[in-house]
Amino acid sequence: MSLNILALTCSQITRYLEKNYGKGKFHARALIREIIKTGNLQFQQAREFTNSPRLTVQLEQDLLLPSMEIIDQQEDSGTLKFVTKLKDGLTIESVIIPMKHYSTLCVSTQAGCRMGCIFCETAKQGFHRNLAVDEITGQLFSARFTLQKKIKNIVFMGMGEPFDNLDSLFQAIRVLNDPRGFDMALRHMTVSTCGVIPGIESLARQGMPQINLAVSINSASDKTRSMLMPVNQRYSLGKLKQALLAYPLMSRRVILIEYILIKGINDSPKDAEKLVNYLSGLTVRVNLIAYNPPDHGISSAGISRKRPQNLSLQSVDDNAMHQFAAILEAKGLFVVKRWAKGRSLQAGCGQLSGKNLHQSM
Ligand code: SF4
Protein backbone atom coordinates (compact mmCIF):
# COMPACT_ATOMS: atom_id res chain seq x y z
CA MET A 1 0.00 0.00 0.00
CA SER A 2 1.25 3.48 -0.79
CA LEU A 3 0.32 7.03 0.07
CA ASN A 4 -1.46 8.46 -2.97
CA ILE A 5 -1.51 12.15 -2.15
CA LEU A 6 -3.86 13.16 -4.99
CA ALA A 7 -6.46 10.64 -3.85
CA LEU A 8 -6.77 11.53 -0.16
CA THR A 9 -7.99 14.39 1.98
CA CYS A 10 -5.81 15.89 4.70
CA SER A 11 -7.61 13.88 7.40
CA GLN A 12 -7.11 10.66 5.45
CA ILE A 13 -3.41 11.42 4.95
CA THR A 14 -3.12 12.17 8.67
CA ARG A 15 -4.69 8.81 9.54
CA TYR A 16 -2.33 7.06 7.13
CA LEU A 17 0.73 8.69 8.70
CA GLU A 18 -0.52 7.89 12.20
CA LYS A 19 -1.14 4.26 11.36
CA ASN A 20 2.01 3.60 9.38
CA TYR A 21 4.63 5.93 10.86
CA GLY A 22 3.34 7.16 14.19
CA LYS A 23 3.25 10.70 12.73
CA GLY A 24 0.21 12.92 12.25
CA LYS A 25 -1.30 16.13 10.99
CA PHE A 26 1.92 18.15 11.33
CA HIS A 27 3.54 16.15 8.54
CA ALA A 28 0.29 15.64 6.61
CA ARG A 29 -0.21 19.39 6.39
CA ALA A 30 3.41 19.90 5.37
CA LEU A 31 3.08 17.35 2.57
CA ILE A 32 -0.09 18.97 1.31
CA ARG A 33 1.35 22.47 1.57
CA GLU A 34 4.38 21.54 -0.52
CA ILE A 35 2.74 19.29 -3.10
CA ILE A 36 -0.91 20.32 -3.46
CA LYS A 37 -0.68 24.00 -2.54
CA THR A 38 2.56 24.91 -4.29
CA GLY A 39 3.23 22.08 -6.73
CA ASN A 40 6.65 21.39 -5.19
CA LEU A 41 7.38 17.70 -5.63
CA GLN A 42 10.68 18.05 -3.72
CA PHE A 43 8.85 17.84 -0.40
CA GLN A 44 12.04 16.61 1.30
CA GLN A 45 13.37 20.17 1.31
CA ALA A 46 10.68 21.40 3.69
CA ARG A 47 11.89 21.86 7.26
CA GLU A 48 9.34 19.36 8.61
CA PHE A 49 11.12 16.67 6.60
CA THR A 50 14.72 17.81 6.95
CA ASN A 51 14.05 17.47 10.69
CA SER A 52 12.65 13.93 10.24
CA PRO A 53 15.16 12.12 7.99
CA ARG A 54 13.88 8.62 8.79
CA LEU A 55 10.30 9.51 7.87
CA THR A 56 11.55 11.26 4.74
CA VAL A 57 13.35 8.15 3.51
CA GLN A 58 10.24 6.06 4.17
CA LEU A 59 8.01 8.54 2.36
CA GLU A 60 10.34 8.60 -0.62
CA GLN A 61 9.57 4.89 -1.02
CA ASP A 62 5.91 5.13 -0.14
CA LEU A 63 4.57 8.37 -1.55
CA LEU A 64 2.85 8.38 -4.94
CA LEU A 65 3.56 11.82 -6.38
CA PRO A 66 1.52 13.48 -9.15
CA SER A 67 2.79 12.13 -12.45
CA MET A 68 0.27 13.15 -15.08
CA GLU A 69 2.08 13.54 -18.40
CA ILE A 70 0.63 16.11 -20.78
CA ILE A 71 1.37 14.91 -24.31
CA ASP A 72 -0.56 17.43 -26.38
CA GLN A 73 -2.07 20.91 -26.09
CA GLN A 74 -4.22 22.83 -28.53
CA GLU A 75 -5.50 26.37 -28.10
CA ASP A 76 -8.32 28.24 -29.83
CA SER A 77 -9.50 31.71 -28.78
CA GLY A 78 -8.01 31.23 -25.32
CA THR A 79 -9.64 27.84 -24.76
CA LEU A 80 -6.97 25.23 -24.12
CA LYS A 81 -7.47 21.51 -24.57
CA PHE A 82 -4.79 19.28 -23.09
CA VAL A 83 -4.27 15.57 -23.49
CA THR A 84 -2.91 13.52 -20.60
CA LYS A 85 -1.28 10.12 -20.96
CA LEU A 86 -2.23 7.75 -18.16
CA LYS A 87 0.06 5.10 -16.71
CA ASP A 88 -1.51 2.33 -18.82
CA GLY A 89 -1.07 4.32 -22.03
CA LEU A 90 -4.68 5.48 -22.40
CA THR A 91 -5.16 9.19 -22.87
CA ILE A 92 -7.81 11.58 -21.60
CA GLU A 93 -8.67 15.15 -22.50
CA SER A 94 -9.37 18.17 -20.32
CA VAL A 95 -10.29 21.70 -21.32
CA ILE A 96 -9.48 25.05 -19.73
CA ILE A 97 -12.01 27.72 -20.62
CA PRO A 98 -10.98 31.30 -19.84
CA MET A 99 -13.41 33.48 -17.91
CA LYS A 100 -12.90 37.13 -16.94
CA HIS A 101 -10.42 36.73 -14.08
CA TYR A 102 -10.13 32.98 -13.64
CA SER A 103 -10.63 29.88 -15.72
CA THR A 104 -12.98 26.92 -15.67
CA LEU A 105 -11.53 23.43 -15.93
CA CYS A 106 -13.58 20.74 -17.63
CA VAL A 107 -12.39 17.36 -16.32
CA SER A 108 -12.85 13.81 -17.55
CA THR A 109 -14.04 11.02 -15.26
CA GLN A 110 -13.65 8.06 -17.61
CA ALA A 111 -11.45 7.03 -20.53
CA GLY A 112 -14.15 6.81 -23.17
CA CYS A 113 -17.82 6.45 -22.27
CA ARG A 114 -20.44 3.74 -22.52
CA MET A 115 -23.47 6.03 -22.80
CA GLY A 116 -23.42 6.28 -26.59
CA CYS A 117 -24.91 9.75 -27.16
CA ILE A 118 -24.90 10.14 -30.93
CA PHE A 119 -23.72 13.75 -30.96
CA CYS A 120 -20.72 12.96 -28.76
CA GLU A 121 -17.17 12.50 -29.93
CA THR A 122 -16.16 10.57 -26.80
CA ALA A 123 -18.90 8.01 -27.38
CA LYS A 124 -17.27 7.04 -30.66
CA GLN A 125 -14.33 5.65 -28.71
CA GLY A 126 -16.46 3.28 -26.67
CA PHE A 127 -15.64 2.65 -23.01
CA HIS A 128 -12.14 1.85 -21.78
CA ARG A 129 -12.20 2.26 -18.02
CA ASN A 130 -13.11 4.44 -15.08
CA LEU A 131 -10.55 6.98 -13.95
CA ALA A 132 -9.06 6.57 -10.49
CA VAL A 133 -9.42 9.42 -8.00
CA ASP A 134 -5.89 10.73 -8.59
CA GLU A 135 -6.44 10.70 -12.36
CA ILE A 136 -9.42 13.01 -11.87
CA THR A 137 -7.84 15.36 -9.32
CA GLY A 138 -4.55 15.21 -11.24
CA GLN A 139 -6.19 17.16 -14.06
CA LEU A 140 -6.49 20.14 -11.71
CA PHE A 141 -2.91 19.64 -10.53
CA SER A 142 -1.74 19.75 -14.16
CA ALA A 143 -3.85 22.81 -14.96
CA ARG A 144 -2.55 24.72 -11.95
CA PHE A 145 1.10 23.75 -11.83
CA THR A 146 2.08 22.45 -15.26
CA LEU A 147 -0.01 24.89 -17.28
CA GLN A 148 0.02 27.68 -14.66
CA LYS A 149 -3.69 28.49 -14.95
CA LYS A 150 -5.82 30.06 -12.24
CA ILE A 151 -8.73 27.66 -11.99
CA LYS A 152 -11.79 28.75 -10.05
CA ASN A 153 -14.48 26.43 -11.42
CA ILE A 154 -14.50 22.74 -12.17
CA VAL A 155 -17.10 21.09 -14.36
CA PHE A 156 -17.29 17.31 -14.52
CA MET A 157 -18.27 17.49 -18.14
CA GLY A 158 -15.30 16.04 -20.00
CA MET A 159 -14.93 12.48 -21.25
CA GLY A 160 -17.24 10.01 -19.55
CA GLU A 161 -20.43 10.01 -17.51
CA PRO A 162 -19.50 11.07 -13.95
CA PHE A 163 -22.31 9.04 -12.36
CA ASP A 164 -20.98 5.92 -14.06
CA ASN A 165 -17.90 6.26 -11.82
CA LEU A 166 -19.57 7.20 -8.56
CA ASP A 167 -17.02 6.20 -5.92
CA SER A 168 -14.09 7.92 -7.62
CA LEU A 169 -16.23 10.96 -8.43
CA PHE A 170 -17.34 11.54 -4.84
CA GLN A 171 -13.90 10.95 -3.37
CA ALA A 172 -12.39 13.29 -6.01
CA ILE A 173 -14.90 15.97 -5.02
CA ARG A 174 -13.93 15.56 -1.35
CA VAL A 175 -10.23 15.84 -2.20
CA LEU A 176 -10.78 18.88 -4.44
CA ASN A 177 -12.97 20.54 -1.83
CA ASP A 178 -10.59 19.95 1.10
CA PRO A 179 -9.75 23.45 2.42
CA ARG A 180 -6.29 22.23 3.45
CA GLY A 181 -5.67 20.92 -0.06
CA PHE A 182 -6.98 22.09 -3.44
CA ASP A 183 -9.61 24.19 -1.65
CA MET A 184 -12.14 24.26 -4.49
CA ALA A 185 -15.48 25.47 -3.17
CA LEU A 186 -18.37 23.07 -3.79
CA ARG A 187 -20.41 25.92 -5.26
CA HIS A 188 -17.71 26.25 -7.92
CA MET A 189 -18.05 22.62 -8.96
CA THR A 190 -20.65 21.24 -11.35
CA VAL A 191 -21.44 17.60 -12.01
CA SER A 192 -23.00 17.08 -15.42
CA THR A 193 -24.96 13.94 -16.21
CA CYS A 194 -26.75 12.59 -19.25
CA GLY A 195 -29.56 11.62 -16.87
CA VAL A 196 -28.36 8.65 -14.80
CA ILE A 197 -31.04 8.76 -12.11
CA PRO A 198 -29.30 6.62 -9.43
CA GLY A 199 -26.36 9.02 -9.67
CA ILE A 200 -28.59 12.05 -9.16
CA GLU A 201 -30.16 10.36 -6.14
CA SER A 202 -26.75 9.41 -4.81
CA LEU A 203 -25.43 12.98 -5.17
CA ALA A 204 -28.46 14.17 -3.22
CA ARG A 205 -27.44 11.88 -0.33
CA GLN A 206 -23.79 13.03 -0.18
CA GLY A 207 -24.42 16.07 2.01
CA MET A 208 -22.94 18.43 -0.59
CA PRO A 209 -25.93 20.66 -1.37
CA GLN A 210 -23.77 23.51 -2.66
CA ILE A 211 -22.50 21.51 -5.61
CA ASN A 212 -24.18 22.29 -8.93
CA LEU A 213 -26.07 19.66 -10.90
CA ALA A 214 -26.27 19.89 -14.69
CA VAL A 215 -28.42 17.56 -16.76
CA SER A 216 -28.12 17.09 -20.49
CA ILE A 217 -31.68 16.98 -21.85
CA ASN A 218 -31.42 17.73 -25.59
CA SER A 219 -35.04 16.88 -26.31
CA ALA A 220 -38.30 16.84 -24.38
CA SER A 221 -39.63 14.04 -26.58
CA ASP A 222 -38.82 10.50 -25.43
CA LYS A 223 -38.60 9.33 -29.04
CA THR A 224 -36.07 11.96 -30.09
CA ARG A 225 -34.14 11.81 -26.83
CA SER A 226 -33.84 8.02 -27.00
CA MET A 227 -32.44 8.39 -30.51
CA LEU A 228 -29.94 11.05 -29.41
CA MET A 229 -29.15 9.56 -26.01
CA PRO A 230 -29.66 5.80 -25.47
CA VAL A 231 -29.68 6.41 -21.70
CA ASN A 232 -33.25 7.65 -22.18
CA GLN A 233 -34.40 4.11 -22.94
CA ARG A 234 -33.54 3.22 -19.34
CA TYR A 235 -34.20 6.52 -17.60
CA SER A 236 -37.06 8.15 -19.49
CA LEU A 237 -37.89 11.84 -19.38
CA GLY A 238 -40.77 11.19 -16.98
CA LYS A 239 -38.60 9.31 -14.48
CA LEU A 240 -35.86 11.90 -14.87
CA LYS A 241 -38.25 14.72 -14.07
CA GLN A 242 -39.40 12.93 -10.91
CA ALA A 243 -35.76 12.63 -9.82
CA LEU A 244 -35.13 16.32 -10.54
CA LEU A 245 -38.26 17.37 -8.65
CA ALA A 246 -37.05 15.33 -5.67
CA TYR A 247 -33.51 16.74 -5.81
CA PRO A 248 -32.86 18.88 -2.69
CA LEU A 249 -31.93 22.25 -4.19
CA MET A 250 -30.63 24.96 -1.89
CA SER A 251 -32.52 28.23 -1.99
CA ARG A 252 -31.55 30.51 -4.87
CA ARG A 253 -29.89 27.62 -6.66
CA VAL A 254 -30.92 26.13 -9.98
CA ILE A 255 -30.48 22.90 -11.90
CA LEU A 256 -28.56 23.56 -15.09
CA ILE A 257 -30.26 22.14 -18.16
CA GLU A 258 -27.93 21.51 -21.09
CA TYR A 259 -29.58 21.49 -24.50
CA ILE A 260 -27.44 20.97 -27.60
CA LEU A 261 -29.29 22.41 -30.59
CA ILE A 262 -29.01 20.19 -33.66
CA LYS A 263 -30.44 21.42 -36.93
CA GLY A 264 -33.67 19.71 -37.96
CA ILE A 265 -33.67 17.35 -34.97
CA ASN A 266 -34.46 19.29 -31.81
CA ASP A 267 -34.43 22.97 -32.84
CA SER A 268 -38.01 23.71 -33.96
CA PRO A 269 -40.45 26.04 -32.17
CA LYS A 270 -42.45 22.91 -31.25
CA ASP A 271 -39.34 21.42 -29.64
CA ALA A 272 -38.91 24.63 -27.65
CA GLU A 273 -42.53 24.53 -26.47
CA LYS A 274 -42.17 20.89 -25.41
CA LEU A 275 -39.08 21.83 -23.45
CA VAL A 276 -40.98 24.63 -21.70
CA ASN A 277 -43.69 22.16 -20.70
CA TYR A 278 -41.17 19.58 -19.54
CA LEU A 279 -39.33 22.07 -17.35
CA SER A 280 -42.45 23.46 -15.69
CA GLY A 281 -42.25 23.08 -11.92
CA LEU A 282 -38.45 22.82 -11.96
CA THR A 283 -36.06 25.58 -10.91
CA VAL A 284 -33.64 25.68 -13.81
CA ARG A 285 -31.31 27.67 -15.99
CA VAL A 286 -31.13 26.51 -19.59
CA ASN A 287 -27.81 26.44 -21.41
CA LEU A 288 -28.43 26.33 -25.15
CA ILE A 289 -25.37 25.09 -26.99
CA ALA A 290 -24.95 25.08 -30.75
CA TYR A 291 -23.95 21.58 -31.88
CA ASN A 292 -20.29 21.51 -32.84
CA PRO A 293 -19.89 19.21 -35.86
CA PRO A 294 -16.76 17.04 -35.93
CA ASP A 295 -14.34 17.77 -38.70
CA HIS A 296 -14.55 14.18 -39.92
CA GLY A 297 -18.34 13.77 -39.94
CA ILE A 298 -20.67 11.61 -37.87
CA SER A 299 -20.76 8.92 -40.53
CA SER A 300 -17.18 7.93 -39.75
CA ALA A 301 -18.11 6.74 -36.27
CA GLY A 302 -17.05 3.19 -35.61
CA ILE A 303 -18.98 2.14 -32.54
CA SER A 304 -21.91 -0.18 -32.24
CA ARG A 305 -24.64 2.09 -30.91
CA LYS A 306 -27.89 2.16 -32.85
CA ARG A 307 -27.93 5.20 -35.07
CA PRO A 308 -30.41 5.98 -37.81
CA GLN A 309 -28.87 5.33 -41.20
CA ASN A 310 -27.44 8.34 -43.00
CA LEU A 311 -28.13 10.66 -40.09
CA SER A 312 -26.04 13.74 -40.53
CA LEU A 313 -25.88 16.09 -37.57
CA GLN A 314 -25.53 19.77 -38.33
CA SER A 315 -25.18 22.88 -36.26
CA VAL A 316 -27.87 25.54 -36.05
CA ASP A 317 -27.33 29.09 -37.24
CA ASP A 318 -27.51 32.10 -34.94
CA ASN A 319 -31.05 32.87 -35.99
CA ALA A 320 -32.37 29.45 -34.99
CA MET A 321 -30.60 29.71 -31.65
CA HIS A 322 -32.17 33.14 -30.96
CA GLN A 323 -35.65 31.97 -31.98
CA PHE A 324 -35.46 28.88 -29.79
CA ALA A 325 -34.20 30.94 -26.86
CA ALA A 326 -36.93 33.56 -27.35
CA ILE A 327 -39.67 30.94 -26.91
CA LEU A 328 -38.12 29.76 -23.66
CA GLU A 329 -37.56 33.30 -22.40
CA ALA A 330 -41.13 34.31 -23.23
CA LYS A 331 -42.25 31.63 -20.76
CA GLY A 332 -40.00 33.00 -18.05
CA LEU A 333 -37.06 30.62 -18.38
CA PHE A 334 -33.56 31.97 -17.86
CA VAL A 335 -31.49 31.05 -20.92
CA VAL A 336 -27.77 31.26 -21.65
CA LYS A 337 -26.75 30.89 -25.30
CA ARG A 338 -23.40 29.31 -25.98
CA TRP A 339 -21.67 28.97 -29.28
CA ALA A 340 -19.13 26.52 -27.81
CA LYS A 341 -15.88 28.26 -26.99
CA GLY A 342 -13.03 26.40 -28.58
CA ARG A 343 -15.19 25.27 -31.48
CA SER A 344 -12.24 24.09 -33.55
CA LEU A 345 -11.04 21.95 -30.63
CA GLN A 346 -14.24 19.90 -30.41
CA ALA A 347 -14.27 21.19 -26.87
CA GLY A 348 -17.96 21.86 -26.28
CA CYS A 349 -20.26 19.86 -24.00
CA GLY A 350 -20.08 16.16 -24.82
CA GLN A 351 -17.71 16.95 -27.62
CA LEU A 352 -14.28 15.97 -26.40
CA SER A 353 -13.10 13.67 -29.09
CA GLY A 354 -10.55 11.39 -27.46
CA LYS A 355 -8.88 11.44 -30.85
CA ASN A 356 -5.61 10.62 -29.15
CA LEU A 357 -7.05 7.79 -27.11
CA HIS A 358 -5.11 5.03 -28.77
CA GLN A 359 -2.19 6.91 -30.23
CA SER A 360 0.14 6.20 -27.38
CA MET A 361 -0.87 2.63 -26.61
S1 SF4 B 1 -22.24 13.18 -23.94
FE1 SF4 B 1 -21.33 12.56 -22.00
S2 SF4 B 1 -22.58 10.80 -21.36
FE2 SF4 B 1 -23.00 11.09 -23.54
S3 SF4 B 1 -21.55 9.70 -24.55
FE3 SF4 B 1 -20.58 11.72 -24.40
S4 SF4 B 1 -19.34 11.67 -22.57
FE4 SF4 B 1 -20.81 9.99 -22.46
Image (cartoon, rainbow, N blue to C red):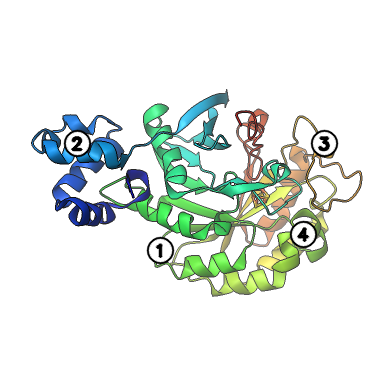
Q: Determine if the C-beta at disc 2 is less than 8 A from ligand 1.
A: no
Q: CA distance from mark 2 to mark 4?
A: 56 Å
Q: CA distance from mark 2 to mark 1?
A: 38 Å
Q: Which residue is mark 4?
A: 225
Q: Which residue is mark 3?
A: 300
**Residue contact between numbered discs 1 and 4, judged by CB atoms under 8 Å:** no
Q: Determine if the C-beta at disc 1 is less than 8 A from ligand 1.
A: no
User: Mark 4 or mark 1, which is nearer the start of the sequence?
Assistant: 1
Residue 213: x percent and y percent? Answer: 52, 59
User: Mark 4 or mark 3, which is nearer the start of the sequence?
Assistant: 4
Q: Nearer the viewer, mark 2 or mark 1?
A: 2
Q: Residue placed at 60% from the left, 53% from the top?
A: 161
Q: Amino acid at mark 3?
A: Ser
Q: CA distance from mark 3 to mark 2?
A: 53 Å
Q: Which mark is residue 57?
A: 2
Q: Amino acid at mark 4?
A: Arg
Residues packed near mark 1 inside 10 Å, few (<14), some (14 to 19) or many (20 plus): some
> Can residue 37 be seen in the rendering of this structure?
no
Q: CA distance from mark 3 to mark 4?
A: 22 Å
Helix, strand or loop at label 2? It is helix
Where is the C terminus found, in terms of image quarters? Answer: top right
User: Mark 1 or mark 3, which is nearer the start of the sequence?
Assistant: 1
> Can residue 331 be seen in the rendering of this structure?
yes
Note whether 360 is above or below 252 in the view shown.
above
Residue 324: x percent and y percent? Answer: 74, 51
**Residue contact between numbered discs 3 and 2, judged by CB atoms under 8 Å:** no
Q: CA distance from mark 1 to mark 4?
A: 29 Å
Q: Residue placed at 21% from the left, 40% from the top?
A: 58
Q: Amino acid at mark 1?
A: Met
Residues packed near mark 3 inside 10 Å, few (<14), some (14 to 19) or many (20 plus): few
